[in-house]
Structures are given as C-alpha cells and as structure tokens.
Image (spheres, helix red, strand yellow):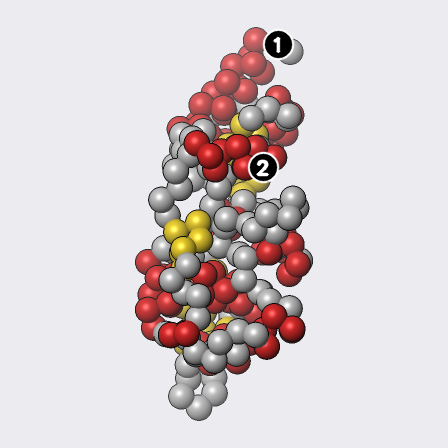
Amino acid sequence: MNDELEHYLRLAEAVIFASAGPVSVTALAHALPVGADAEMILPLLRQRYTGRGIELHEIAGGWQFRTAPDLANALRRVVEVPRRLPRVAMETLAVIAYHQPVTRGEVEEIRGATLSQSTLDTLLEAGLITPRGRKEVPGRPSLWGTTPRFLEQFGLASLTDLPKREELLTDGTGQERLSPHPGIFSDAESEMMPEDEENSVESTPVEIRVEGSPGDV
C-alpha cells in the first residue's frame, strides 16, 4: 500500500470517527483530497477493522464505527446506556417500522390495544418516527413512518434490512434484545396482550441500543 492511499485511509478513519452520525459517501468525498476515491476507500477501511472490537458499518445511508455485535453482552456489564423506551413504545415502533406509512388507528388494530398520545410523543421526542402526510380517508388521519435516526439506532443501512419478526425478540443467543425492537408478537402472543395500554407493561424500561460509536464506549 502506497503512502498516499494510507493517508487517505487515515483521513477517512478520522472523519468517520469524529462525526456524530453516519457519514455519507458524498460527505466523505468532500472531506478527502481531490483525486481520492471514497467508494474505493470505504471497503478497504472496513476490511481493516474486520474482527476487531470496533467495526465499520454501513448505516442509514452512511458509514459509522460501531462496537462489534458479538461483544454486546460484555459491554452491557460495563457501559451504562441511559436512553430507554417503555416496552409499549417499542412495540408501537416495531409496528410502524413494518407497516409504514401507518395511521394511529391501524397501529391500534395491529397491536390489539389502544395507543396513547404520550407513546407517540415519546417516539417523536426520541427522533424515531415522523409524520408522513395524511391518509385520504374520512377524517384524514396522520400517517407515521420511521426516520433516519431509527435506521441508525438499529444499525440498518435501509428498511429492507429489517430482520424477520422472530429475530426482533432475541439477539441470537436466546437473550432479549436491548434495542427498540423486541415487540412484534406472534399471533398467539398478541392474543395475550392487554386490551389497553394502562394495563400493559409500559412501565418496563427497555434500552434503545447496546451498540455505539467508539466515542460512545
């Protein structure tokens, strides 16, 4: 590897590390010297971090350093993740992610439980959902969808990367996932859900994420 390419790799590494969110190819290209090929550099940089505690991932239309997923359990013991969502908010978020754009009434129908405004407000304040216009039916109810921050929190490049329903409940080791998506239930589990949110498990806090950038840990 020549010195010029090594310089480009180091510079790309520094730009991505210092950025608060995922860095797009276009943004990285602007940060690199003229003549540097960002699309070529990113795979080389990702390969450099393969198998290490910090990995480079394509997330939400950009690139970001994240802790290796297989180290999540170890990190939970030493890293405090203060941001939490009530379980009912996570269930609502999962429904919106899979069925967007979706109305409040449709979310309630899918969950089999009423949806309070406070739950929507929680997701809005967290930057995980956003209005997507209105449905052209009587009353013109608001439509809801997820945001780029949702993709970032989940570590997804796009919505097409959403895992299967059964994968939302566990992290692959049999442990419940400490992320915003433990909540789309199977038909049998849905029948056991409470009729309304007041009697639900909303008070149970669940962490939004366990992975983060190097600066997070």
Mark 1 element type: loop
**Residue 126: x and y, percent?**
36, 55
Q: Which residue is mark 1?
A: 2
In primary-sequence order, the first of circles 2 and 1 is 1
Which residue is found at the position 45% from the left and 29% from the top? Answer: 214
Image spot of residue 38 (x, y percent): 56, 29
Crowdedness of circle 1 by 10 Å Cα count: few (<14), some, many (20+)? few
Find out whether the residues at labels 2 and 1 contact each other: C-beta distance under 8 Å: no
Indicate whether 139 appears above or below 46.
below
Say whether residue 152 is left or right of residue 164: left
* 2 vs 1, front mark: 2
The residue at the point 57 percent across, 9 percent down is: 3
* Disc 2, SS: helix
Residue closer to the observer: 78 or 148: 78
* Residue type, numbered disc 1: Asn
Residue situated furthest bottom in the rendering: 138
Quadrant for the N terminus in the image: top right
Depth check: give the residue in front, 62 or 97. Answer: 97
Gap in angstroms between the C-alphas marked 2 and 1: 32 Å
Label annotation for residue 69: 2
**Residue 50 makes an appearance in the image:** yes
Q: Amino acid at mark 2?
A: Pro
Residue 199, how many percent across, how many down? 41, 74
